[in-house]
Amino acid sequence: MSRETLVAMTRNLVAHGAADTMEYADDVVRVPASAYTDPALFELEKKQIFRRLPLMVAPSCELPNPGDFKAMDICGVPLLLSRQKDGSMGAFLNMCTHRGNPLAAGCGNASRFTCGYHGWTFKADGDLIGVADAQDFGKIDKAKHCLTQFPVHENAGLIWVTLDPASKLDIADYLCGYDELLKAFEFEGWTLFAQRTLEGPNWKTAYDGYLDFYHLPVLHKDTFGADFYNRANYFAFGPHQRLSTPSRFAIKVSGEDDQQMDLSAMSDEELPQEVLVQGVWTIFPHISIASFYGGGQRGALISQLFPGADVGTSYTTQFYVMENQPETPEQVQAAHDQFNFLEIVVRDEDYATGKRQHEALQSGLMKEVLFGRNEKGGQVFHGWAERLVAASDEELVEIFAAEQRQAAE
């Protein structure tokens, strides 16, 4: 079924490309400028979106082996990911149950975690196994002082965690079947080539750019080129969206040669896997995935966006994952060249522009921003952000249960 859905999307793009058309939103949408600049709304978004909805916290290839761990802070919540002996993923509150001191920092490999404050020790599965000087501390039930666990879901080579241990929102429901489509990237078994973190503007200002092809030949005229496409059709799965340019043609990269393929002349069975995942895939509220080719093989840039310390800042971790680890010096350099090029595009063009835009909006002299009929992705994103911020925990569960029922009809 997943391939059938991907093929149907590709045929949609081919048909619109052949007709020189695109799919439009119903009307121009106006979004209050305060949606980007209001500090109170920003704090509410962190609470209602980032501390309540499932977040894609890591590609699986960042933690491939039993014992691999990663500690990170998301909107004030210390998270510890730990690959278990059986290959499953554990997600824990990174706080010792004695006084709350974080147990781990950065990334590494460990079978247990010992608190650097008083020496309490926990297994990688969160169980408390050692209380330092237990005869002096006093009697406690260790089974009642294990690490707090978060809901976790791993599929399609990606890891999701909900930063609310009491959440009743099923992560699979939240993904609306989108994770099954993401399997087409075939990330399982891929390798993490490189990663870095970039500072950006307000998180919604930054995320708008991932949902917008309209700006490509203008803002990126010196990197992508002034004749680059600026149209996109949007495919929505709940709040998650794929956008791709309508065209009957695709480029197949093989070695040193770029070969143009006429997709309209190919059968469904002949459509290559890389064609079925072309474009940009976004996972609400903070992930963008796009395919690239560098170092002699398929790669993808996974951009992971989080709000910063205040309304005007964000930070994005870019993961460059590859089908296989480059082997020759030439392949390694080509992969670095691709990754470095993408840093320039995002840091010096997208995010630099976003920071200037945000500073101007903070003047308060512009009351609304516009999203045109050709900018459906941004319209959908802001609609979902507003809806989910306002939803209660009970309404949140029902919203995505309804999405599941609608998809099944």
Image (cartoon, rainbow, N blue to C red):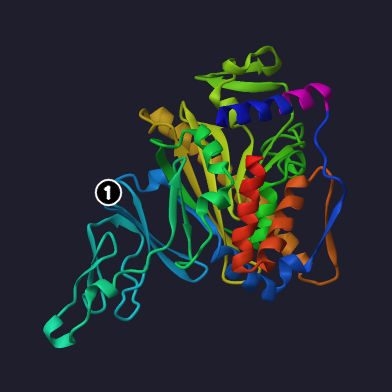
Residue sitting farthest toward the left: 135
Please report the residue visible at 79 percent of the width from the left and 65 percent of the height from the top.
Answer: 33
Where, by quadrant of the figure, is residue 247 drawn? top right
Q: Is residue 18 magenta?
A: yes
The location of residue 404, given as percent across then percent down, is: 61, 47
Tell me if 202 is positioned left or right of 328 in this view.
right
Please report the residue visible at 69 percent of the width from the left and 21 percent of the height from the top.
Answer: 249
> What predominant SS class does the magenta segment belong to?
helix
Residue occupied by mark 1: 66
Where, by quadrant of the figure, is residue 292 drawn? top right
Query: As rendered, which of 408 and 380 lies closer to the eye?
Result: 408
Per the rendered image, the range of residues in magenta is: 13-20
Please report the residue visible at 54 percent of the width from the left and 25 percent of the height from the top.
Answer: 273
Please report the residue visible at 49 percent of the width from the left and 30 percent of the height from the top.
Answer: 298
Q: Quadrant of the N terminus?
A: top right
Q: Amino acid at mark 1?
A: Pro
Q: Does residue 390 appear in this view? A: yes
The location of residue 203, given as percent across then percent down, is: 64, 60
The location of residue 51, given as percent across then percent down, is: 54, 66
Query: As rendered, which of 260 and 341 lies closer to the eye?
Result: 260
Taking 192 as reference, is 369 above or below it? below
Where, by quadrant of the figure, is residue 409 drawn? top right
Q: Is residue 385 magenta?
A: no
